[in-house]
Amino acid sequence: MADDIAGRIARIEEKIEAACARCGRKRQDIRLMGVTKFHGVESVEAACKAGISLFGESRVQEATEKFSKFWESRRKDGSIELHLIGPLQRNKAKKATAFFDCIQSIDRDSIIDELGVLTAEAENPIKIMLEYHTGEETKIGFPDMGSLLKAAEKVLSFPGLRPVGLMTMAPFTKDTVLIRSSFRSLVFARDELEKRFSGYWSCLSMGMTNDYEIAIEEGATLIRVGTAIFGEG
Ligand SMILES: *Cc1c(COP(=O)(O)O)cnc(C)c1O
């Protein structure tokens, strides 16, 4: 299994390099996240050995069980990062602030308030990203520029929250025109936010197994890849 994972990562690296070459970007400007949902701690270990240092999980409960085991076997020195990329329920918010390095999936105002209050006394602010709804079918995320701007203003009113970028999911389709336009909406939104609240939005988290090469061409700085690394869940 470990060999399979290392081999798949090597092939993804080739595709990332090729996509970078096509659009004149540098490999080092793009982070490859291994999305380990539905996969065990052995998969995390194997990916880590193969050079992955950024991981994503969709559920707080699954992530804490799995990564608590993972942390038993190594020193927690900040060289490995874990992000939440799935919807966060109110009753899991406290646990999430304690466990994740970044919460990418901030998709509504009420969860900003919740996290803002929870982190009011925190020593270090927690990194967050705003999730923008750019796809056709998914209903997750802030639906338009107006709500996104208001959310950004709200986030910045809490000292315990540090916005670092935006995330999106493209529609699940083979239509690359639709996928591309979804990613372009995220780039546009980032540019608008930078004009209003400069300095907080450098990360563009977009692109998954089926569309990460397009995402790179459109400016992704973080791609979230599960199936292509770990196989079907
Ligand atoms: C599962 C998931 C991914 C990874 O999806 P794959 O298609 O398996 O690469 C990326 N982002 C989010 C938000 C996910 O839930």
Image (tube, helix red, strand yellow):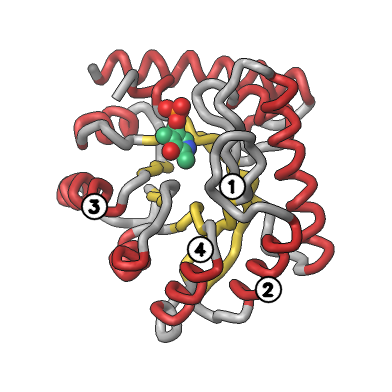
Residue 153 badge: 2
- Disc 1 marks a residue whose amino acid type is Met
**Label 1 – label 3 distance at C-alpha:** 22 Å
**Label 4 – label 1 distance at C-alpha:** 13 Å
Which of pointers 1 and 3 lies earlier in the amino acid sequence? 3
Q: Which residue is mark 4?
A: 127
**In the image, residue 205 lies at what x, y percent?**
59, 43
- Disc 3 marks a residue whose amino acid type is Gln
Instruction: Check the image and report above or below for 233 versus 97.
Output: above
Instruction: Check the image and report above or below for 184 versus 83.
Output: above
Camera-nearest residue between 83 and 117: 117
Q: Which residue is mark 3?
A: 61
The N terminus is located in which quarter? Answer: top left
- Disc 2 marks a residue whose amino acid type is Glu
| SS assignment at label 2 | helix
**In the image, residue 167 lies at what x, y percent?**
59, 47
Instruction: Check the image and report above or below for 49 versus 9.
Output: below
Mark 3 crowd level (few <14, some 14–19, many ≥20, 10 Å Cα): few
Label 2 beta carbon within 8 A of ligand 1? no
**Label 2 – label 4 distance at C-alpha:** 15 Å
Left/right placement of residue 100 relative to residue 132 reads: left
Which of pointers 3 and 4 lies earlier in the amino acid sequence? 3
Mark 4 vs mark 1: in front? 1
**In the image, residue 55 lies at what x, y percent?**
39, 42
Which of pointers 2 and 4 lies earlier in the amino acid sequence? 4
Residue 167 badge: 1
Which of pointers 4 and 1 lies earlier in the amino acid sequence? 4
Q: Indicate which quadrant contains ligand 1.
A: top left
Which quadrant of the view contains residue 187?
A: top right
